[in-house]
Image: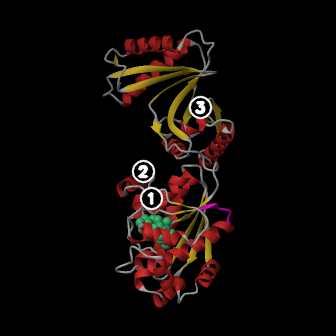
Amino acid sequence: MSNVILARMGEVTLKGLNRGNFETQLKHNLKWRLRGFGKLDIYQSQSRIWIEAKDPGNPNFADSKAAYDIMNAVTQVFGIVSVSFAVKFEGDFDSIREESVKYVRELLGEHPEYKSFKVETRRGNKNYPMDSQEISAEIGGDILEAFPDLCVKMKDPDFIFNVEVRDYNYVYSGKIMAHRGLPVGTAGKGMLLLSGGIDSPVAGYMMASRGMPLECVYFHSHPYTSEQAKDKVVELARIVSRFSGTLKLHVVNFTQIQLDMLKNSPQDMITITMRRVMLQIAERLAKQNNCKCLITGESLGQVASQTLEAINVTNEVVKMPILRPLIGMDKQDTCDISRRIGAFETSILPYEDCCTIFVAKHPKTHPSAKDVEEAEKNLDIAQMVEDGLKDVETITI
Ligand code: ATP
Ligand code: MG
């Protein structure tokens, strides 16, 4: 008898001819994400992936409580929809009866409030002498006999008891929902403009959930933005990397560029001008690092630089597609995702990002092409982009 983690695949199973590539990537990502949990066997049958310890003494598999960390890590691997902790054993139907009653006894010890249940059975082994309904009925009968206070309830029972008969037998109850999506590495790489706010980490998470590996760029204006502001971005990149896998964070020294802008262009256009330069630097870094798109946390109408006019005049400076996964999202929903991925507490730390310090009191909300031309006529934009690219620190996370 041993304990195993059962992970269910989602959208991956809807893939046609290239399903195999998605599954291989998913297993590879699981291996990488779980590398700190001891030597593991990770194998697949049909739409499930099974994770077992090679070493029978592995403490992460001792019981469902001890397995919390490893199961949580599995839920963060895109491509998995839910996870359960199961007991695996060999033997005939009598052994399934025995293990089932034993399992439910332990479960009721932890949840004395449970009053109703139902049994669900899956048969991977179609030659098994009983069909799933017969197995459920028999095991349900045994549980009722052993625990006369319980009753069977088909709709909304307090717990579902699962039996699976395959090459081995498995019993378990309950599942944890995972983050779904597609395995990271099945799409091309994107360059995320990561600031210290709430939105951009969520934007990165959302694109990674579609299979996209990430690199990040952060525009830092030391000493106008503090070391803590940078540490905060590094921490946010680390949080995103739990989902996206290892990534590079490029920190661009933006101070001189911003000071030049403050001096040589109108106050009310500074945000737009700054964003236009940021995007050009980001696009060049993206090309250098084999990224095929840029990603931002913009959401329509959220601030002055996110009106359609402002988006148009910033968009036009680059050729690469700019993905804006939050464009139609409500801030509240973005905050919910931020909390769910564990970024919120870090994002709301009070350290300024560069935009908040160099921001105008009354920025132009509907800039025209003419406004932009006027604002940039005393700036050597091409040189600014070159200068920005000369002063980049790259941190591997
Ligand atoms: P966030 O919550 O992500 O900071 P925001 O609501 O503060 O976004 P803006 O400051 O207008 O909005 O920034 C819009 C987007 O531009 C950000 O989501 C991010 O992708 C990018 N961005 C802004 N400032 C920086 C920066 N200093 N470094 C890198 N990217 C930035
Ligand atoms: Mg911000």
Name the quadrant containing residue 146.
top left
Is residue 77 found inside the magenta-colored segment of the image? no
The mark total stands at 3
Dot 2 corresponds to which residue?
340
Identify the secondary structure beneath mark 1: loop
Q: Closer to the N terminus: mark 2 or mark 3?
A: 3
User: Residue type at mark 1?
Assistant: Ile
User: Residue type at mark 3?
Assistant: Ser
Camera-side residue of 199 and 107: 199
Camera-side residue of 194 and 270: 270
Dot 3 corresponds to which residue?
47
Looking at the image, residue 152 sits to the left or right of residue 380; the answer is left
Identify the secondary structure beneath mark 3: loop
Dot 1 corresponds to which residue?
327
Which residue: 42% across, 50% down?
340
Looking at the image, residue 286 sits to the left or right of residue 192; the answer is right
Q: Main secondary structure of the magenta part?
A: loop
Residue 12 appears at what percent x and percent y? 59, 38
Query: Mark 2, residues whose alpha carbon is within 10 Å: few (<14), some, or many (≥20)?
Result: few
